[in-house]
Amino acid sequence: MRKSFLLSLITLAIAFILSLAIGSVFISQKDLWDILRGIGDETFTFIIWQIRLPRTILVALTGAALSGSGAAYQGLFRNPLADPFLIGVASGAGLGAVIAMSIQWPYSFWGLMAIPMAAFITALLTVFIVYMIARVGKTIPTTNLILAGVAFSSFATSLTSFLMLRSTSEVRRALGWLLGGASQAGWNAILAILPYLVIGLGILLISGHALNLLQFGDDQAQQLGLNVTRIKTILLIAASLATAAAVAFSGIIGFIGLIVPHLMRLWFGADYRRLISLSIISGASALLISDVIARIVLAPQEIPVGIITALVGAPFFLWVLRRAKNQGYW
Amino acid sequence: MLKIQNLSASYHGHQVLHDVSFDVKSSEVLALIGPNGAGKSTIIRAASGVIPSIGHIRTNGDDFSLLTPLQRARYLAVVPQAISLPPAFTVWETVLMGRTPYLGFLGHASSLDDELARQALSRVNALAFINRRVGELSGGEAQRILLARALCQSTPILLLDEPTAHLDLQYQVSLLELIRELAYTEKLAVLIAMHDLNLAARYADRVALLVGGHLKAIGTPREVLTTESISHAYCLPVQVVEHPFMDTQLVLPK
């Protein structure tokens, strides 16, 4: 196996174990091992199986989805600043999730399943609208993309806030759950987003070569044999599926989809056949670590993980912006 | 060989190519010449299927309009101008992308693909910078890499869109020497859009003169590049003279 993959997988394993061990109750490695063998302390066993493990898995999946779709959006738009959050797709998906919640409070299983579906539909609509607004001829200038994304994002966020304010107290609790991140989600949430993730990320994983070709522009990609229109449509749907899955139960978490693919590109090269899978693995690690930090920085109180990613991500974004401007080398 | 019949194309409702017909035979270099906006690049783009067109583009009876982009890419390779290439790919990665029409599901190259890419790089004399990033190459080097990528496609037809436009004189000459040699040794049908009339006269077997989207003349450089036709096409008085020590002509503006 290549060194880059080995390194990413080891990091993921460490982040995963940290996320299981650290929280309001610390569970040592020995206890973890006992629980895995079924001979652990009963309280600890409950905490791991019903709280920490589903949360850890959901956070990992969310990070993987945001980062994988971020890499795909960057490739699709040929723009280093494309990220599900910055281009407004995350906010669009969040709006869809909240609409679904305000229609049916997700106590029932099917109510729960409706959330990622609604998120996916609005995410796709958002991509389409932002793309149409930002496009100039065949290219999408960075400034247009970000401005259109930010504008649409504000629009979606204000609609979301409006829905929250006019909602009943019960729905408001649901919204708190949405915005509070993954802390209270259980196994059902993972089940509800899994199909979207598997299909979305699965498609992205086999599209590395197509994304490589698209970096040369639509004309050259087609002259090299790619059915450009079809591939772009498929990739947009796949990336939006993954984004919707991420947002549905974890709320809107910015910058993971920007930072991780960037670092992977910087360290391991521009080949999307590697970049997509490395972004997925490392996106999971990055969000797991952010989530652990969010749990301990004001312990016993938790802060939303989005605060951590934004604290790191916003300066990173500015750095990328400068770099992209100076050398166009990404 | 490449057969273009009654080709017309439009941009934004404005017709830019009118009923153009010509053939390019194997082992032949045909240069498309004409003033800016004459339709040289449009022919390249229409023939490679990236813009819609009316008419027929065929090779040995196969009509290109019925082929998928993948099938088309096995017949016809395009060398674009080496501007705004993605800088972060290596030369090797870039050239291997020429194998796209033959790659499997995941786009991984076989040892045959590797071997053909190596051969193509050796043909353009670029094996030395195989691991460099495209962003670090000079214009001439990048243009050679794009030629290697097209050769890698193993097609019988090669289209080039002003490949010498941004190159210094020595690169222009060496690139065109190479293209002509490849046309003969690999029996390629080469169609090349050019703006330099003197280079076209020297390196093309035949030239096709386009004006305002119409094909005005086609034939050997000696037949087409006349004082009258060029003066008329470019709306500029020129004098076509014999090269003092080569068997070719020179177009001199008066």
Image (cartoon, coloured by chain):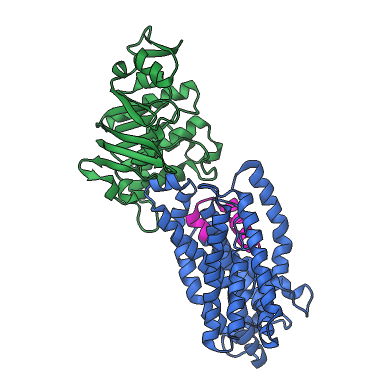
Chain colours: A blue, B green
Give the image location of residue B103, x and y in percent.
35, 52
**Placement of A307 over or under B198, stated as above or below:** below
**Placement of A99 over or under B202, stated as above or below:** below
Give the image location of residue A214, x and y in percent.
47, 50
Q: Residue lying farthest top?
A: B244
Q: Nearer the viewer, residue A212 or A118?
A: A118
- Is residue A260 located in the magenta-colored stretch of the structure? yes
Q: Is residue B82 visible?
A: yes
**Placement of A113 over or under A217, stated as above or below:** below
Give the image location of residue A183, x and y in percent.
67, 80
The quarter of the picture where residue B22 lies is top left
**Placement of B151 over or under A137, stated as above or below:** above
Could you tell me which residue is drawn at 62 percent across and 82 percent down? A102
Q: Nearer the viewer, residue A276 or B189?
A: B189
Magenta span of residues? A255-276
Q: Residue lying farthest left?
A: B61
**Residue A219 left/right relative to A306:** left
The quarter of the picture where residue B240 lies is top left
Q: Residue lying farthest front?
A: B13
Give the image location of residue B156, x and y in percent.
28, 38
- Is residue A73 located in the magenta-colored stretch of the structure? no
**Residue B227 left/right relative to A169:** left
Main secondary-structure element of the magenta-colored stretch: helix
